[in-house]
Image (cartoon, rainbow, N blue to C red):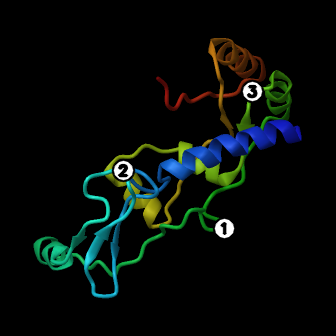
């Protein structure tokens, strides 16, 4: 992998992760935080709820759902070491992608962020450290021609493609 492609891929993944949570719903800057008084505050600036203090939310949540807000889950920004298996890469395919100039990555965090959906079961599994199987590589085509190149390379080198995202 050339340094240029690697840097471009990392810039793309960093910008995506600054916005969206990899292990939950919504945006990284928006969440409930409990202050020193035990009152819930909603962080971030993108919602009308942002910055509000909700003094009774903790008691309501625990009483209504029988849950404990002190429970800590696997919610770090990066998967724990060993949680993600190393990628099994087809080197000829990697070299082909590299020659196209299309950004790609095989970093664990990029693979986890794009290797699951956001249904309730998947989010809770991730938050508890159960990462499971993730793609071996992520590719960011910028146009139709990039997609055609990637599909042709995958066919040539017998590589399975799984589309994620779209417009």
The residue located at (63%, 53%) in the rendering is: 109
Q: Name the residue under label 3.
A: 102
Q: Mark 1 and 3 residues: CB-CB less than 8 Å, in contact?
A: no
Q: Residue at x 66, y 65 (%)?
A: 82
In the depicted structure, whether residue 16 falls above or below residue 157: below
Instruction: Look at the image and tell me whether residue 105 can be seen.
Output: no
Q: Nearer the viewer, residue 8 or 165?
A: 8
Residue lying farthest to the bottom in this orientation: 37
Disc number at residue 46? 2
**Circle 1: is it few (<14), some (14-19), or many (20+) Cα within 10 Å?**
few
Q: Is residue 93 left or right of residue 110?
A: right
Residue 39 higher or lower than 94, as above or below: below
The residue drawn where x is 22% and y is 75% is: 67
Q: Which comes before the other along the chain, label 1 or label 3?
A: 1
- Given residues 63 and 32, the one toward you in this image is 32
Which dot, 1 or 3, sits closer to the camera? 3
On screen, residue 119 above or below 1: below
Which residue position holds label 1? 81
């Amino acid at each position: 992998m050339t340094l240029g492609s690697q840097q471009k891929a990392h810039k793309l993944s960093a910008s995506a992760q600054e916005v969206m949570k990899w292990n939950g719903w919504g945006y990284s800057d928006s969440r409930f935080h409990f202050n020193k008084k035990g009152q819930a505050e909603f962080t971030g600036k993108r919602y009308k709820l942002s910055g509000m203090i909700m003094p009774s939310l903790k008691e309501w949540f625990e009483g209504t759902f029988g849950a404990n807000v002190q429970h800590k889950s696997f919610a770090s920004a990066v998967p724990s070491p060993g949680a993600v298996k190393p990628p099994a890469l087809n080197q000829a395919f990697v070299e082909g992608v590299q020659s196209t100039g299309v950004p790609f990555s095989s970093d664990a965090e990029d693979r986890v962020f794009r290797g699951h959906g956001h249904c309730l079961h998947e989010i809770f599994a991730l938050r508890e450290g159960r990462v499971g199987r993730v793609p071996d590589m992520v590719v960011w085509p910028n146009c139709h021609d990039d997609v055609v190149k990637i599909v042709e390379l995958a066919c040539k080198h017998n590589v399975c493609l799984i589309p994620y995202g779209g417009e």
